Amino acid sequence: MSAAAGSATPASDEDHFRYVLRLADTSLVLGQRLSEWVGHAPALEEDLALGNIALDLIGEARLLLAHAGRIEGRGREEDQLAFLRDAPEFYNVALAEQPNGDFGATIVRQALLDAWQLELYHSLTASTDERLAEIAAKTLKECRYHWRFSCGWLVRLGDGTAESHARAQEALDALWRFTEELITPDALDVRMASCGIAPPLAVVRGRWETRIGAALGEATLLQPSSEHYPWHGKSGVHTEHLGHLLGEMQHLQRTYPGVTW
Amino acid sequence: MYTQALDSSGAEPGSPASAGEVERERRFQERIDRDEKIEPKDWMPQAYRQTLIRQIAQHAHSEIVGMLPEGNWITRAPTLRRKAVLIAKVQDEGGHGMYLYSAAETLGVSRGELIEQLLAGRAKYSSIFNYPTLTWADIGAIGWLVDGAAIMNQIPLCRCSYGPYARAMVRICKEESFHQRQGYEIMLTLARGTGAQREMAQDALNRWWWPSLMMFGPGDAESVHTAHSMRWKIKRFSNDELRQRFIDLTVPQAQFLDLAIPDPVLRWDEAAQHFITGPIDWSEFQTVLKGHGPCNRERLGARRAAHEAGRWVREAAAAYADKHRDRVGGAERHVQTV
C-alpha cells in the first residue's frame, strides 16, 4: 500500500509502484553494468572500487524492488521483478544501460548518475513514503562514496593526458543527451512530487547542474550543449542495449523457470 | 584461492660464501627452530627470500587470475542475492591479491615487477584456474572444492616463519572459510533441486574433482624442494599429507549431497582410516602447467588485455598527480557532498 497517507494528493498504488521501480531499475541496471568490470579494470584498486559500487547498487536495488513488490501487492518478490520482466517493463533511466565502453566512458556515465543519485536520494530522505525515506538514508551514504570515486576519476582523466582528456570528452559528448530525462519531469514525476513521495525534479536539477558544472570545470571538460532527446528509459522506452543486458542477466531464471537457486 | 606446487622452482639454498655467512645462517635457522617470526628487516638467506618471493607471488597471481573464472558468472548469477555474494567473493580474491603483493613487497620486489612477470608468462599461478566455468554449478564447485583445497593448504601457512606472509594468511583463511561454505551451500541447493539442477551439480563435481586434487602439487616422491621449505617452516606438511586430509574431509561432504565422486576405485580403508583414491592423471596436470589447458590462453589474455586497456588510465593518473603535486586537495576538491 502507498505510504503517502495524509498528504494532500494521495498517490495511486500504480504510480507509486512505477516510481519505486524507476529507482530500483536504475540501480540494478547500473550495478549489472559495473559488475562487468570485475576482473578487468585498469588496476587492482579500481577493480575493487568498481565491484564495491556494483555491490552497493545491487543492494539498493534489492531493497527497492522488495518495497515495490509490497506496494504492488501481487506477491512479486525481488527476483521475480528483476529476472522476469522484459525490457519495456523496465523503468531505469537509459543512461544506466549504456555499455561500459572504455574506463573513461564508464567514469563519465558514473559521475553523471552518481551526482544525480546523490541529490535525488538526499531529497528522498524526506519522502512521505517512510520506507523509501529509510532506504534513501542508507543509499545516500553510499552515493557519497560513489561520487567521491567517480568525480575524482573524472577530474584525473579530464585533466590528465591529452589522450585521457580526449577520451573523457568524447564519452561526455556521446552520453550527455541521456541526462535530459534525469532532470526533466514527466507526468509521473509531477504526481509523485505533488504527494510528497518524491522531490520536485527542478530542485534536483539545480543541484545536479551545479555539482556537475563544477566537476567538469575542474576536469577541464566542456559541457556539451543540450540536445532534446525525448525517448526516456524511465517511461519504458529504452536503447537497444537493455535487451542484451537483460538477456544475459536473466538467462538462468528464463531457462529453468520456477526453480530455487 | 591458492597456487599448487608451492615448492616447484623454489630456489636452492646457496653455498655460503664465508664463515660469517655460515654463522648467520646457523643463527637464522635457530630462530626458525625456536618458532620465531622472521620480519622484513631481519637478515635472511638469499634462497629463503627468493623462495618466499616466488611462492607469495604465485599465490597473489592465483588470486588475481582466479577472479576470472568466477567473474564469468557474475552477470548471470541466478538471483540478486547470489549475484551480490559472488561479487563480494570475487572482490575478496582481489583483496587477497593485494595483501599478498604487499607481503611480497616487504621482501624487496615491487607489485609492478611481479605483474610484469605474470603477463610475460614467466610466473606461475594455480593451474586450476585454467579450467572453464561452464554452468552455474561450477561456482558452487569452485567454492566447495577449490576454496576447500585452498584452506587445507593455507591454514598451516598462518604459522609460516615469515611474519608478513603468516599475518596475511590469517585474514585470508577467514574469508576462504566463508567462501567454502557458500560454495557448498550452492551445491546443496542444486543437489536438493530439480533433476536438471542435480545433473548440473554432478557434472561440476565430475569436472572439478581431479583438478582440485592436483592443486596440492605433485606427490611427495616427485616434490624435490619440500625439504628446504620444511626446514625453513615455510611449508609444514607435505603435498600428499594435505591432499589426503582434503580427500578425507570432502568425500563425506559429497556423500551428504548424494553426489558421486568420479572415481570408480575410491574406497574407505578401515586400517588406515583414510579414503583411498585411484591414481591421479599427472600427465593432465603437466599439460595444463605447460600452458596447454582449456583456458590458459584466455586467462592470461584477459589479464594482458586489462593491463593494456588500462595503460592510458594509469598514465592519466600519473600525469594529473605530477601537475597537481603542489596543490592541496587536487581531484578531491570538487568532491563536496550534500
Image: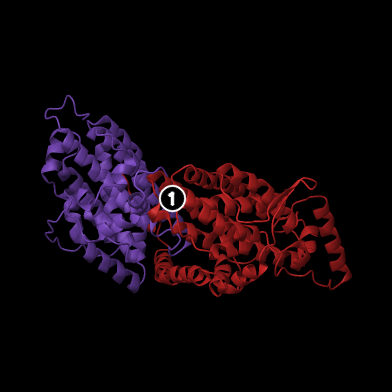
Tell me the red chain. Answer: B
Q: Position of residue B121 (x, y in %)?
A: 57, 74
Whether residue B184 sits left or right of residue B166 in the image: it is left
Secondary structure found at label 1 = helix
The percent position of residue B177, horizontal first and vertical second, equals 59, 45
Horizontal and vertical percent position of residue B231: 81, 59
Structural crowding at the residue carrying mark 1, measured as other residues with C-alpha within 10 Å and reported as few (<14), some (14–19) or many (≥20): few
Identify the image quadrant of the C terminus of chain B.
top left
Q: How many marks?
A: 1
According to the image, what is the colour scheme of the structure?
A: by chain
Colour-to-chain, purple: A
**Residue located beneath label 1 in the image:** B196
The residue at the point 48 percent across, 52 percent down is: B199
Q: Nearer the viewer, residue B36 or B300?
A: B300
Q: Residue at x 84, y 71 (%)?
A: B16
Q: Is residue B158 left or right of residue B102?
A: right
Q: Residue lying farthest front? A: B264
Q: Quadrant of residue B318?
A: bottom left
| Of residues B121 and B208, the one drawn nearer to the viewer in this rendering | B208
Q: Quadrant of the N terminus of chain B?
A: bottom right
Q: Amino acid at mark 1?
A: Ala
Task: Note whether residue A214 is visible.
Answer: no
Asked whether residue B242 appears in the rendered view, the answer is: yes
Query: What is the quadrant of residue B38 in the picture?
Result: bottom right
Residue A51 x, y percent position in the rendering: 42, 53
- In depth, the one of B164 and B283 nearer the eye is B283
Question: What residue occupies the far top of the structure in this picture?
Answer: A6
Side (left or right) of B163 relative to A198? right
Q: Badge 1 sits on which subunit?
A: B
Q: Is residue B318 above or below residue A258?
A: below
Say left or right for B2 vs A240. Answer: right
